[in-house]
């Protein structure tokens, strides 16, 4: 619904620009004609003609810029028109993957999972065909607020602070635009760890 309103607004703006440009062109011809009739001085006529030409060319340039902008917006509307629907689907995709990654299941369930894995594969291929890309997130990757959302912090002897320990849910892009950030756990800052140790020590001293 919002996409349709955006498209209607673009069309209205385009019609207004064309109408204004046509009006300016008509006024340019009328003013030029009046100037030629009212002025006998050739230099004055040439000066006013140049001024009118500048205004007309400026109007044409504005119209061309608007046409390009309108085309870019039309492409964006087409590219990202499915973003709301895909965002609604992603939680179901998460649950689907969690179910397929379940362990300690019976042989009968395993046979069912083989079929469901094929369905999931086809489902992901369909999303990829619409421009959906998974944000690859691995332990040890540097946290990037443009693509990651920090759910919490944990201590780590393996990774430096500011690095990702694990991903809790996958992130996705739609073409080059963020659709959903990857939810991650990051390494806690050393200062915070030291502060927690101090607090624990004080608590111990108070109990003694």
Image (cartoon, rainbow, N blue to C red):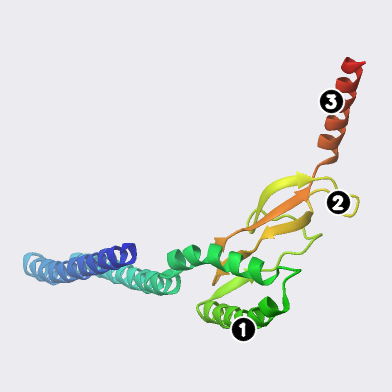
The image quadrant of residue 76 is bottom left
Q: Would residue 154 be visible to someone looking at this image?
A: yes
Badge 2 element = loop
Mark 3: secondary structure: helix
Residue 138 relative to residue 71: left or right: right
Determine the CA span between mark 2 and mark 1: 41 Å
Point out which mark residue 199 bears. Answer: 3
Tags 2 and 1 touching, CB below 8 Å = no
Residue at the spot x=46%, y=67% of the render? 83
**Which of the pair 36/195 is nearer the observer?**
195
Select label 2 or label 3 by which is in front: 3
Q: Tag 1, which secondary structure? A: helix
**Counting residues from the N terminus, which is met first, the one under dot 2 or under dot 1?**
1
Residue 1 spot, x, y in % from top left: 30, 64
Q: Nearer the viewer, residue 129 or 25?
A: 129
Residue 29 is drawn in which quadrant? bottom left
Label 1 neighbour load within 10 Å: few <14, some 14-19, many 20+: few
Look at mark 1 in the image and give the residue it sits on: 115
- From what the image shows, is residue 31 above or below residue 162? below
Across and down, in percent, residue 3 comes to 34, 66
- Residue annotated with mark 2: 160
For label 3, the crowd category at 10 Å Cα-Cα, with few meaning under 14, some 14 to 19 and many 20 or more, is few
Which label's residue is closer to the chain start, 2 or 3? 2
- Where is residue 33? Give x, y as percent: 10, 71
Mark before the other along the chain sequence, 1 or 3: 1
Residue 22 horizontal/vertical position (percent):
17, 71
Whether residue 49 is visible: no
User: Which corner quadrant holds the C terminus?
Assistant: top right
């Amino acid at each position: 619904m919002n996409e349709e309103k955006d498209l209607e607004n673009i069309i209205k703006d385009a019609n207004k620009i064309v109408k204004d440009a046509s009006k300016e062109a008509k006024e340019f011809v009328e003013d030029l004609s009046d100037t030629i009739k009212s002025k006998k001085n050739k230099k004055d006529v040439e000066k006013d003609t140049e001024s009118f030409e500048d205004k007309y060319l400026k109007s044409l340039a504005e119209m061309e810029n608007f046409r390009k902008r309108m085309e870019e917006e039309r492409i964006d509307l087409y590219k990202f028109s499915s973003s709301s629907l895909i965002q609604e689907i992603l939680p179901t995709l998460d649950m689907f993957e969690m179910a397929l990654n379940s362990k300690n299941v019976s042989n009968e369930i395993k046979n069912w999972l083989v079929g469901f894995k094929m369905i999931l594969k086809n489902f992901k291929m369909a999303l990829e065909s619409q421009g959906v890309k998974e944000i690859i997130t691995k332990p040890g990757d540097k946290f990037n607020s443009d693509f990651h959302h920090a759910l919490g912090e944990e201590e780590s002897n393996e990774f430096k602070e500011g690095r990702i320990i694990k991903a809790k849910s996958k992130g996705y892009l739609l073409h080059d635009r963020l659709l959903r950030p990857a939810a991650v756990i990051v390494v806690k800052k050393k200062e915070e760890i030291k502060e927690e140790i101090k607090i624990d020590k004080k608590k111990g001293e108070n109990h003694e």
